Amino acid sequence: MTEQIPDPTAAPADETDAAADTALAPTETPLLPLVVEQRQGMFGVSGSGDTSGYGRLVTPVVMPGETPRPYGGAFDAIADALEAAFVRGGETAYRQAVAGVVVDRGELTFKVRREHLVEVCRHLRDDPDLRFEMCLGVSGIHYPELEGEELHAVYPLLSITHNQRIRVETDCPDADPHLPSVTSVYPANDWHERETWDFFGIIFDGHPALTRIEMPDDWPGHPQRKDYPLGGIPVEYKGATIPPADQRRSYS
């Protein structure tokens, strides 16, 4: 039997495997975070309503900033393919439509200007190097502290062809809460856009029937906005009311 003599110049197998995994994994470059607001206390209660003892706790609310190239893994190839699709389209420059790219927690997000949202989605769906055939819905977000971009909409996309996932994000101001509907590209978003309108008040222009889907038709306001009042709802069978959350006392 011949004894195998290890090569002293070869890296250990576990280190080689780790290096290969690192080469394939997306590289998350350190980001410059965007501070949205500073929260004080544990539960957002002001005045004498906070009995938790955490009144002096100050927590910054931050969002990741734009990620510089290279994004790492397959993310650069996706961005290159989208940019090439805009070049072939010839109508809009890539940077006119895409305001920024964020890689965070292993996810790739294209931040898109709202007037180019439908065009971006069409490229992402139709380009053979992209083929994001499925949109899994739209999620609304309300950032009342971000003046001029208070309302955000996030679209998670799935490419069945290439087995890849990305996100598209856009925003609109509270004073003009309009976004173009993407139902012409992703028809199944019909119901999701109705839900986002119902809960956040984002108006999707071009939607075939933008009506409430969860709340009653005569419901006032949009209940998942952060400026929507909490509590104060009459409890008829008790002849009482539930006070708003910031006016409740834990020992009452």
Image (cartoon, rainbow, N blue to C red):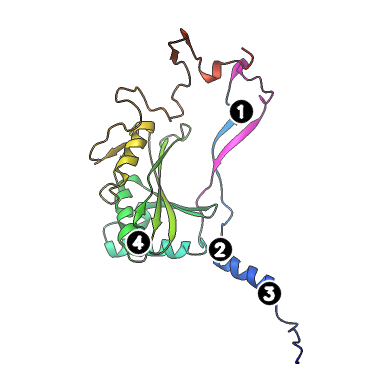
Q: Nearer the viewer, mark 1 or mark 3?
A: 3
198 or 120, nearer to the observer: 198
Q: Earlier in the sequence, mark 2 or mark 3?
A: 3
Q: Are marks 4 and 3 in contact (CB under 8 Å)?
A: no
Q: Earlier in the sequence, mark 1 or mark 4?
A: 1
Q: Amino acid at mark 1?
A: Gln
Q: On the image, numbered disc 4 is attached to which residue? A: 131
Residue 13: image tag:
3
Q: On the image, numbered disc 2 is attached to which residue? A: 25
Q: Position of residue 188 (x, y in %)?
A: 30, 47
Q: On the image, numbered disc 1 is attached to which residue? A: 40
Q: Earlier in the sequence, mark 4 or mark 2?
A: 2
Q: Is residue 101 left or right of residue 43?
A: left
- When the figure is inspected, residue 213 is found, relative to residue 70, above or below; the finding is above
Q: Earlier in the sequence, mark 4 or mark 3?
A: 3
171 or 157, nearer to the observer: 157
147 or 188, nearer to the observer: 188
The residue tagged with tag 3: helix, strand or loop? helix
Count of residue discs:
4
Q: CA distance from mark 1 to mark 3?
A: 50 Å
Q: CA distance from mark 4 to mark 3?
A: 37 Å
Q: Amino acid at mark 3?
A: Ala
